[in-house]
Amino acid sequence: MSKKYEICLRLSQEEAERLRQDAKRCGLSKTAYLRRLIVGTQIRTRPSQEVRALREEVHRIGNNINQIASSVNAGIATAEDARRGLFLLDKVYEMMYEIAKQ
């Protein structure tokens, strides 16, 4: 889509700063942010570093649980392995609860 129209928009200092901050929080340029507002696209802020770290940890725990489940199904795992898997699953639920509270 070619861009044929240019609009000059005058903002107060506070409005300009809010636009800059809102666009930055979403990882967008001011122009891209405004375009998405105009067309009604849902705009989400980028997750914080804490949330990204929690997601990575939950992903690692999920991989460990899958490996333990595979071992149990293959008859290789011990009762202690199964207990460890349940412990990790509890950790996942705790992290998900913490994320949901934010």
Image (cartoon, rainbow, N blue to C red):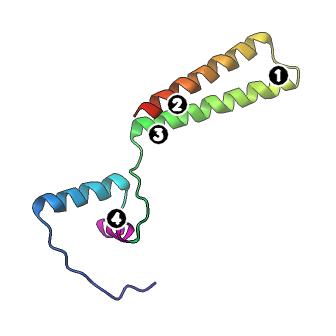
Closer to the camera in the image, 72 or 94? 94
> In whole angstroms, how far apart are the C-alphas of marks 2 and 4?
29 Å
- Look at label 3 and name its amino acid: Arg
Secondary structure category for the residue under label 4: helix
Disc 2 residue crowd, few under 14, some 14–19, many 20+, Cα 10 Å: some
Closer to the eye: label 2 or 3 = 2
Looking at the image, residue 101 sits to the left or right of residue 21; the answer is right
> In whole angstroms, how far apart are the C-alphas of marks 4 and 3?
22 Å
The residue tagged 4 is 33
> In whole angstroms, how far apart are the C-alphas of marks 1 and 3?
30 Å
Closer to the eye: label 1 or 4 = 4
The residue tagged 1 is 72
> In whole angstroms, how far apart are the C-alphas of marks 2 and 3?
12 Å
- Look at label 1 and name its amino acid: Val
Residue sitting farthest toward the right: 75
The percent coordinates of residue 43 (x first, y second) are: 40, 58
Secondary structure category for the residue under label 2: helix
- Look at label 4 and name its amino acid: Tyr
Q: Please report the bounds of the magenta region as a residue range.
A: 30-38
The percent coordinates of residue 82 (x first, y second) are: 75, 16
Disc 1 residue crowd, few under 14, some 14–19, many 20+, Cα 10 Å: some
Q: Are the two marked residues, 1 and 3, in contact with CB atoms closer than 8 angstroms?
A: no
Q: Which image quadrant is residue 18 in?
A: bottom left
Mark number, residue 52: 3
The residue tagged 2 is 96
